[in-house]
Image (cartoon, rainbow, N blue to C red):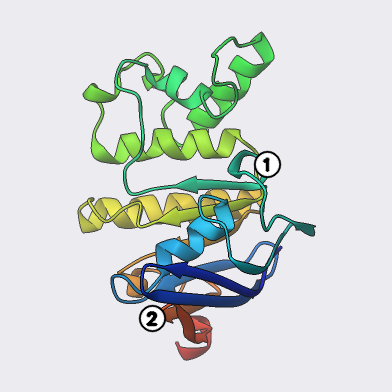
Amino acid sequence: MIKLEQVLFRYKSMSMQFSLHIRAGEKVAIVGESGAGKSTLLNLIAGFELPQQGEIILNGENHSFTQPFERPVSMLFQENNLFMHLNVEQNIALGLKPELTLTPQERKCIIQAASAVGLRDFLNELPTRLSGGQKQRVALARCLLREKPILLLDEPFSALDPELRREMLNLFLQLCDVKGLTLLIVTHQPQELEAKIDRIIRIGKGRIISEFNPKETI
């Protein structure tokens, strides 16, 4: 599902190189020190950064130099990127149709996505009236609506308290199982994921330096 072959990317004085193979439906955590290249790896997969050389294969197709909207990928950032003047329904709809001219069937899909993340009763609310966890649920519903098989999460819960963070992680993992999504999540709390994911990959100085299956250690 995700295959990087000798992907080279130069950022300022750091030269990064990644080779990686992630199977369809696999859940993988990316860990490492700040500045190690974790977010850069996700940005290369998503298309926000382009490699100097190497190949990026996604869902069996070469996406080394395609634009982000052409890739079978949804990405959720630490900042949930909601528009404060749009209500929950409209913010979710942006994942389907940016111009917000929705058909009845598309509106039904939005309601289903909102229901999947527990926001069915909040469709008319503005983001300013939502908690931090609810805002992330809106962003997640928008990702789910796009129906992309690869989901990338870049420290999306770091600003949440531990209890809410665990709740959101469990929700994401459950929805990945239901939808059959391939998941990559950058995190500084891998211990919260160890019993729930398939692999932990550690990055240092722009390279993959180790990886292991946490389920084999418990």
Instruction: Give the quadrant of the N terminus.
Output: bottom right
Specify the quadrant of the image occupied by residue 109: top right
Specify the quadrant of the image occupied by residue 61: bottom right
**Residue with the mark numbered 2:** 205
Lateral position of residue 71 relative to residue 111, left or right = right
- Tell me which residue sits at (33%, 49%) in the image: 78
Cα distance, mark 1 to mark 2? Answer: 29 Å
Amino acid under disc 2: Lys
Residue 209, image x, y percentages: 46, 87
Does residue 93 sit above or below 147 in this rendering? Answer: above
Mark 1 touches mark 2? (CB < 8 Å): no
Instruction: Give the quadrant of the C terminus.
Output: bottom left
- Tell me which residue sits at (47%, 51%) in the image: 172
- Tell me which residue sits at (62%, 49%) in the image: 178
Q: Is residue 194 visible?
A: no
Amino acid under disc 1: Glu
**Residue with the mark numbered 1:** 70
Q: Nearer the viewer, residue 150 or 14?
A: 14
